[in-house]
Each structure stands twice: as structure tokens, then as C-alpha cells.
Image (cartoon, grey):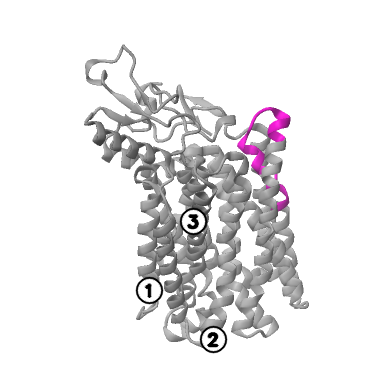
Amino acid sequence: MSAGAQQKLFQPLQKPLHDQDHDPIPPGSSGSGSTVAPSEASNDSTSSLVVVDWDGPDDPEKPLNWSRAKKRAIISSVCLMRFTTPLASSMMAPALLQIGDEFSGTSEMLITFTVSIYIIGFGIGPLILAPLSEIYGRNLIYNVGNVLFTLFTALCGVSPNATALLIFRLLAGVFGGAPLTNGGGTISDLVPVNERGLIMSIFSLSMLIAPVVGPIAGGFLSQAANWRWIFWLLTILSGFTTIVCFAFLRETYGPVLLERKAARMRKETGNPHIQSANKSPLPLGQLLRQVITRPVEFLYRSPVSIVMALYMGLVYGIIYLLFTSFTQVFEDTYGFSQGVAGLCYVGLGLGCATQLFSGHYSDKLYVQLSQRNGVQRPEYRLLLLIPAALSLPIGLVIYGWTAEFKIHWIVPIIGTFFIGVGFSGSMTSVQTYLVDAFSSYSASALAANNVVRSIAGGVVPLAGPSMYGKLGLGWGNTLLGLLGLVFGLTPMYFYRYGGTKKEKKDEKEIPV
């Protein structure tokens, strides 16, 4: 491969799809041992170069080969982070009226924006944090993000006005977004491809359940005390999460571990010509520019990323529109108190919990299709997107029309169960697909997806009151359901024709 091709913002995987558990080995190096001498054609400046790689596929230092106990501790810590930061996204939703009363004179849209701006922060943060993890490692990004998230969450609790609350919420969202994308990369580092479905479903469930639990706790807490106690509780939980992560998280990113191995060997031998197999030839400044722009590249160079991002943006926008409107709907329509209205999120949470079964089935289906066809393809993960894409509009129609006609409250909650099934099934299928398809660059691929869905999750709720005011709950949710159905079935094109195949364009391979 030419030098120009090596310096692209991201390269296609230099490996067949059936060997996705192993990182691609750069040109000029070998994976047969820990050190490899250069060819005789090398010039004098590189003739003594020693390249450090894994000691074969069974190297105990490789994260895929770590003990189950160590893997479980790391994945559990990441799931705890994945639960804590999304919990803060919706926990304050039932207290919006209370916040509006305290900050009198502030518009209703601005108060609603205190929920939305946090989600927008989720989109901004990973654009920088996810690529940086591919240089400095995932562990550093996690720990710095946890500390700053805890700090800005605490500052939300002492905000003197709505403007300060908005600023601190945005910053908390930026640094709280680290586990949303890096977590998928950690799982890619630790879990073989044929076992990722179940683990990714557990990982995704921790994020999906949090916004459901948040309003339940937030409703009763704000009713018993006041809205500031929501942030005190979040600060305590985040502080606990930070301590757990410092204790149990370990670096899992292969290139960073190999660089540490090379540095250790340079120190032990005194040989300055030892370098890791994954070391980039680019200067640090150029490398930083490259990795920070990589997620943006995914959004205009990769049709797979574009379609998946648009679909998840729509789904995420719908979910956060419901998060910000549930309380008002059930209080106004059914006369629920602020605390009891929070319990209306239970149906959505139970629907999300079904993805544990779908994740397990995803792995079984993946293995069966791989054995039948003789090749492993990331697109096998997309089959379960079909029932998810059907469940979402069904739930929206049931919820919208039964609430519109004030049918017994249990019926719209049943509708939210189907919405939860569609939401969680879509999230798990898309995230597992992106992790399998883009492997070493999964953090950047997930960051690209995350920024679109987070912006949608922040903006769509702002349009909700106007839409429901003109169309009502029935037609408003029917419109959302039709859009979800169309966008949800579009990714099936990639299953049929192979979305991760490579295209040649201007004699350069680009991932599509």
C-alpha cells in the first residue's frame, strides 16, 4: 500500500470478515511473533528497526485472551458508566414545571431545552473523546470524563439561574458522553465477534433503562424535596462510579497496549529502534487532526454510517420527545400526580429489557448464518432490525390514539412497551453491526452515529409541543410511526447487497 493510502483518515480493514477478532497487521510487519526484523531492502536508517506485535493469536497480554473475571469487571464498570450518564438525561424531566416556577420569567421552550442541551452535549463530546481514545487509550478518556461529569453535575445543583443550568448541563453532557461510544470499542477489544450480540445487548440495556428509571426517581424526589436534589443524587452516584472505574478499569485498546510493550522493551534493552506494529508514521499534531476528523469522515464517506445515523437519529428523537411529554400527557389526561406520572415510563423500560433475549438470539443467528454461508458478515446483525422497525410504529399508534381518546391508562402504557421493544432492538442491532463492521475504528464509527442521534434527541423534543398542538397525539404519533417504518427498513438494503464491501474510487479504497 502506498504511503498516501496509509495516511488516509481511515483505512478499510486489511483482513477478511471472517477474522475480525484480530487487528489488521500493518504492511511491512508480521503477526507471527513479538518482534520482526525489516527486510533486507530497508535503508540504513531503518535497518535496525524492531517491530513489536502480539506473540501470536493466543498471547495472554491480548485483551481477547484475558480471564473472564477480568473481562467481566471491565465490562461491568463500563455498563455502570453507561447507566449513570444517560440517567441524568431524563431524571429532571418530571421537575421541569418546578424549575420553571423557580426561574420565573424563563420561557417554556428554554426550560425544556435544559433536557435537550444535555443530549446535544452527548453528541459533541464523543466527536473528540472517541477519536482521542484511539491515540491515548480508552481508560484515560473514561477517567477524565467521569471526574468532569461529576463536577459539572454538582454545579447543576447550585445553578442560580436558567442560563447557568444550561451551560453546566451542556458540559456535563459533553464529558458524560465518553462511555456512549468508547464502550462499544471496549467490548470489541474484549469479546470475540460471535459473542458480541449478548454483551452488546447488556451494554445497550444499561443505557436504555437509565432514561426510563430517571423520570420515576426524579418525579418522586422532586415532589418530596425539590429539583436540586436530583443533581445531588446524580453527583453521589457519579462519584461512586468514578471510584469503581479507577479501581477496575484497565486499558484494552490493542495499539496502545502494543506501544506500552514497545516502550517497556526500549527501556529494558536500551534500543531506541523498537516500535509497535501499530505505530503511526504521522507526527502527533497531524495524527490528532486525522483522528478528530475521522467521525465526520464516516458521516459523508460511508453510506452505511449515514443511513444508520439517520435512522437512529429519528428513533432517538422520538424517544426523547416521549420522555419530555409523558409526564404532561398522563398528568393532564389521566390526572396523575407528579410522582405517579413517572411510573408511566415502566412500560417503555420493560420493552427495552426484551433486548436481552434479542441479543442472545442475535449471536445464535450470527453463528448459524456464518456456518450456513461459510463466511462471517456484519450484515447478519441487521436481520433483527426488521421486528424492531415494525414494533416501533405499532407502539406509537397504540400510544397516540388511545391517549387521544382517553382510553384507560394501561392501554397507552402497553403501547409504550412496543415502543421500547423497537427502540432497544434498533439500538442493539445498529451498534453491534457498526462494531463488527468497523472493528478497530468502532469508537469513531459509533461517535459518528452518536452525534446525529444526540442532536436529533436534543432538537426533536423542542418541536413536539407544536406538532402535538396541530396534529394531536393520534396523528402526531402516527406520522412519527410512518417515518420510523420507512427509515427502519432501509438498512435491509445493506443486508441484501453487503454494505461493508469496498469500493474503488479514484484508485483509493474507501469503506462504504
Q: Camera-side residue: 245 or 445?
A: 245
- Residue 51 to residue 258: above or below: above
Amino acid at dot 1: Ala
Q: Which mark is residue 154?
A: 1
From the viewer's perspective, tell me whether residue 114 is left or right of residue 409: left
Please tell me in which quadrant of the rendered image residue 150 appears: bottom left
**Which residue is disc 3 drawn over?**
78
From the viewer's perspective, tell me whether residue 283 is left or right of residue 194: left
Q: Which region shows up in magenta?
A: 369-388
Mark nearer the N terminus (2 vs 1)? 1
Mark nearer the N terminus (3 vs 2)? 3
Contact (Cβ within 8 Å) of mark 3 with mark 2: no
Helix, strand or loop under label 3: helix
- Residue 167 to residue 443: above or below: below
Determine the main secondary structure of the stretch shown in magenta. Answer: helix
State the image coordinates of residue 270 (x, y, percent, origin top left): 21, 31
Please tell me in which quadrant of the rendered image residue 475 appears: bottom right
Q: How many C-alpha atoms fall within 10 Å of the one at disc 2: few (<14), some, or many (≥20)?
A: some
Residue depicted at x 64% and y 49%: 487
Is residue 378 within the magenta segment?
yes
State the image coordinates of residue 140 (x, y, percent, origin top left): 36, 52
**Which residue is disc 2 drawn over?**
223
Is residue 161 within the magenta segment?
no
Amino acid at dot 2: Gln
Amino acid at dot 3: Val
